[in-house]
Image (cartoon, helix red, strand yellow):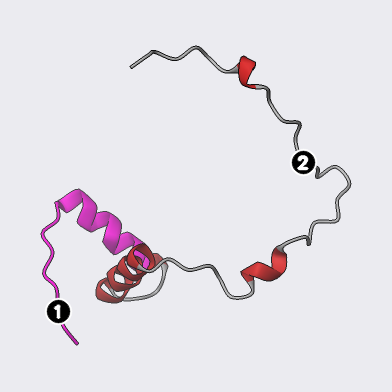
Amino acid sequence: MPQISLYIDDKTLKKVQNAAKQHHTSISKWVAEQLKMKVDPSYPAHFEELFGSIKDITFKEPEEIHLSADLPRESL
């Protein structure tokens, strides 16, 4: 498997070390997982099954806001 060298500041390294420790994994594996999620994002398994799953009557589509309520914008 190919290897990558990274140059990061001490503050960032501490954060990476803490994150890896919290996930009970090595720094290398944690960084690899973060990079993979960034370059190849995906939804969790069965995510699409959540569509329409909320049965709460208070959950409804908000009213459409008219464009006149928008702030004036600078002309370019």
Q: Nearer the viewer, residue 69 or 29?
A: 69
Q: Is residue 36 magenta?
A: no
Helix or strand or loop: what does disc 1 sit on?
Answer: loop
Q: Is residue 50 above or below residue 9?
A: below
Identity, as a three-letter code, of the amino acid under mark 1: Gln
* Other-residue count near label 2 (Cα within 10 Å), few / some / many at <14 / 14–19 / ≥20: few
Q: Amino acid at mark 2?
A: Glu
Which residue occupies 32% across, 60% down?
Answer: 18
Q: Residue 64: where, in percent of width, then height?
A: 72, 30
The residue at the point 38 percent across, 13 percent down is: 75
Quickly name the residue at label 2: 61
- Report the quarter where the N terminus lies: bottom left
User: Hey, which quadrant is residue 29 in on the image?
Assistant: bottom left
Q: Secondary structure at mark 2?
A: loop
- Where the C terminus falls, by quadrant? top left
Q: Specify the segment rendered in magenta.
A: 1-21
Residue 8 appears in which quarter of the rendering? bottom left
**What residue is at 72 percent from the left and 62 percent from the top?**
51
Nearer to me, 10 or 28: 28
- Considering only order in the chain, which callout, 2 or 1, is on the residue closer to the N terminus? 1
Q: Residues within 10 Å of mark 1 (few under 14, many from 20)?
A: few
The structure residue drawn at horizontal position 24% and vertical position 56%, both measured from the top left corner, is: 14
Residue 14 is covered by the magenta coloring? yes
Separation of marks 1 and 2 at Cα, in angstroms: 48 Å
Q: Which residue is mark 1?
A: 3
